[in-house]
Every structure is written in C-alpha cells, then in structure tokens.
Image (tube, helix red, strand yellow):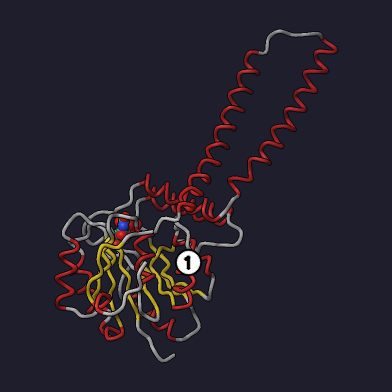
Amino acid sequence: MSSCNLTIVVPVYNEQENISVFIEAIKVELASIYQHLDILFVNDGSTDNTVNMISAEIVVNDNISLIDLARNFGKEAAMTAGLKHARGDAVVIMDVDLQDPPAIILEFFRLWRTGEYDTVYGVRVDRSADTVMKRCTAGGFYKLFNMLSHRTKLPENTGDFRLINRKVIDALNQMPERNRFMKGMFAWTAFRAIGVPFERPERNLGCTKFNYWSLWNFALDGILSFTSWPLRVWSYIGFGISFFAFLYASHILIDTLFLGIKVPGYASIMSVILFLGGVQLISLGVIGEYIGRIFTEIKQRPIYLIDKVTGQYQRQDTPNE
Ligand code: UDP
Ligand code: MG
C-alpha cells in the first residue's frame, strides 16, 4: 500500500464550544500520523457560531476543510456528504464532542495499514456515560434488529465511529437511498471488518442532539430499511386469528345446534371487534410506515444541499452533486 492519507469526517451541529478543543486533541493525540491527515467538517445547519469557529481554524490550518450544508439534514445526511467528498484513501467518521477518543484512531490506522481489514470500528465496552434507559433501549434495539434482519447483522455497542477504506467508501457512495441508516449500511457492505474496544467518555461540552423521540424514529428507520418482516408478519397473524375464529365459530355452531340460541354475547362480541380493530389499525400503520418511506425514496430529492465548501476542498475540484 503506497498512499495512506486519512480524512477525518466530522459532522457538526451547534458545536461552537467543541471545535477548537477537538482540533487541539487531534493534533496532540494523533501527532505521529498528523502529516497523513485532513479534517473535513460537515456543518449540518448550525445556528450558532460553529461555522465561524471552523472558518477561523481553516485560516491557520491548511488541512482543515468545511462543507456547509444549506440547513439541518440530520447526522446521517451530513456523514453522507462527508463520505462523498472525502479524498483520503480511508475515512474516519467521528463526533466532535470527544466521545470518540482520538487516540483510538492510531489503532484503527495500524490495523488498516496491515491491509487485512476494510473496516475498523470502535466497540463501546463501557457505556456508563449513557443513562440506564439509553443502555437498555439501545441493547434492545440491537437484539431486535439482528433478530429481524437476516443478512445484515449490526455489531452490538457500535456507533458510527470507525475507519473505512476506499472500497467501503465507494460502496456507500453507490447507495442512493434517502432513508439512510448508516450503521446498517456500513454493516451491509460486509467487507472484512474488525472491532476495537474503547471506553466512551461523557460529552466534552454542550448537550446531546438526540432525544428519545428522535432515537425512536431513528430505530424505526433502521428496522424498516433493512427488513420487510414487519410488513409480512400480518399474513401470519391473519392466518392465526382466522384459525382461532374458525374453532370458535365451530364451537358456537355446535352450541347453537344442540343447546339452542343463547342471546348473551355482548362481552365476547365487543372484545373480538375491538381486538380485531386494533390489529387492523396496527397493520395499516405498518403499511403506512413503509409507504411513507417509499414516497420519500421515489421523489429522488438530493440527500443534502451544499451551501458552500471552504478550505482545501474548495481549492481543488470538488465533485458536484
Ligand atoms: N450531529 C449532526 N446533525 C444532527 C445531530 C448531531 O451533525 O442533526 C452531530 C453532532 O454535532 C455530533 C455528532 O453528530 O458531532 C453526534 O451527536 P451527539 O453527540 O449529540 O450524539 P450522542 O453522542 O448523544 O449520540
Ligand atoms: Mg455525543
């Protein structure tokens, strides 16, 4: 392997207090490979001083660049923009809040340079920085996802923090979908991968950009983009219910034939109607979730819009969207 340039892609959304601390940490912790690095920030529609902070750094560092998105498109879209433009032979995706420790990148880099791995991902061994609720819901999500999705398996306790080589970057850049669940897409590429354990510290400054509602929607996106099982399960539930309905109808028929017509039945009729009404609404809702996503896909809108590109990436040809 002759070339070994590494682009660090960093999506940022309202992170003004973290920019200079982050760059300083990269310089100090990655001093031994710093000459191989360039840092590509993707500003995801920040409304604070983030862009000015990055622009000030670009003036004094010629290996820092910025893709400024037109508005907030979400972290998945911001990462997509970064991957599309990154020029390194490999890319490391990491958060700016130092929850992904820069020192681990040395190990990522070493493993990549052995030439045996296409992906080197960080595995969180200690999630004590997360709340109990977050740990339980995340754990449950990975289990459910891996149960439902037959081909794509997500490694547990793995975020977006990883190194991917050109082969994986090119594969991801070929994936046109609008509903982008990147953790699943990384796993889908399924090239040779290895995990590196690390302890995840608490966020440096500022607060998390994801609340439980956005995490729930994110989890739904993940499951619905990688399996059609929730759509198909209703046929089986329907068969099950029909089978019991047939048994119950036979029971009523025999009862009526031998014991005559009994008028009471309000409770059972009501329960059956309400139960079936609920089941039908849930199944319609699942179909709706898929149709909503098909609608988003079929419009074929761009995944993100770029306002401007600055730094190193502006000076040379930047591929247009
Ligand atoms: N982020 C982003 N767009 C968003 C939300 C977050 O680019 O809409 C960035 C954010 O600036 C940070 C990274 O994604 O660099 C991870 O966000 P955060 O630390 O809030 O997530 P958590 O660590 O709580 O999962
Ligand atoms: Mg964080």
Label 1 amino acid?
Answer: Phe
> x%, y% of residue 178?
44, 56
Looking at the rendering, the quadrant in which ligand 1 lies is bottom left
The N terminus lies in quadrant: bottom left
Q: What residue is shown at x 57% (from left), y 53% (from top)?
A: 227
Q: Is residue 97 visible?
A: no
- The residue under label 1 is 186
Residue 239 drawn above or below residue 254: below
Q: Is residue 151 left or right of residue 115?
A: right
Mark 1 and ligand 1: say if the CB distance to the nearest ligand atom is below 8 Å.
no
> x%, y% of residue 196?
43, 73
**Observer-nearest residue: 8 or 201?**
8
Identity of the residue furthest to the right in this view: 258
The C terminus lies in quadrant: bottom left
Q: Is residue 247 visible?
A: yes
Residue 52 drawn above or below residue 277: below
In terms of secondary structure, where does tag 1 sit? helix
> x%, y% of residue 6?
35, 80
CA neighbours of label 1 inside 10 A, class few (<14), some (14 to 19), many (20+): many
Q: In this view, does 304 lie to the left or right of 314?
A: right
Residue 27 drawn above or below residue 212: below
Q: What residue is shown at x 73% (from left), y 27% (from top)?
A: 245
Quarter occupied by residue 94: bottom left
**Observer-nearest residue: 114 or 307?**
307
